Image (cartoon, rainbow, N blue to C red):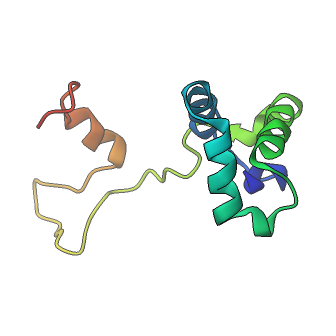
Amino acid sequence: MQKIIDGRVIDLNLLENTRKLLKIASLSKAERVWKQSVSDRFNYSFQEGFQKIERLSILHPELLVNKPFQIEKPQRCCECQRLPGFPLSPLKNLYKLLPKNGKI
């Protein structure tokens, strides 16, 4: 929440997913978790913070970016090695290999 309130970019999906979640989740439970975990750093409630985000998303739509933190570079772990004929691939190419139904 604080990123967009501070004028920094956030992932568009974060706002959309929070809207969906609030349709089915208990606002009182969200407020309780907010108070327990982060309210000491902010002087507003969860609901007030979300209302600020909603207003900012209208006033500054440029702060909502689809996957702003995804870096298009070859994905590798410490075990990966470059081999001739088997290059490392950007993450978007790896996602193309995954089945649509989520089963491997």
Q: Residue 69 location, x and y as percent?
A: 55, 52
Front residue of this view, candidates 73 and 77: 77
State the residue lying farthest toward the bottom.
Answer: 78
Q: Residue 81 location, x and y as percent?
A: 16, 70
Placement of 27 over or under 81, stated as above or below: above
Front residue of this view, candidates 98 and 73: 98
Front residue of this view, candidates 91 and 3: 3
Front residue of this view, candidates 53 and 76: 53
Q: Is residue 74 left or right of residue 61?
A: left
Placement of 3 over or under 17, stated as above or below: below
Please state the total of marks drawn on the protein image.
Answer: 0
Q: Is residue 89 left or right of residue 27?
A: left
Q: Is residue 61 left or right of residue 24?
A: right
Residue at (76% x, 41% y) in the render: 63
Residue 57, quarter of picture: top right
Residue at (10% x, 53% y) in the render: 85
Q: Residue 8 location, x and y as percent?
A: 77, 53
Residue 29, quarter of picture: top right
Residue 59, quarter of picture: top right
Residue at (23% x, 75% y) in the render: 78
Q: Residue 18 location, x and y as percent?
A: 61, 36
Pick the quarter of the image with the C terminus.
top left
Residue at (72% x, 48% y) in the render: 9
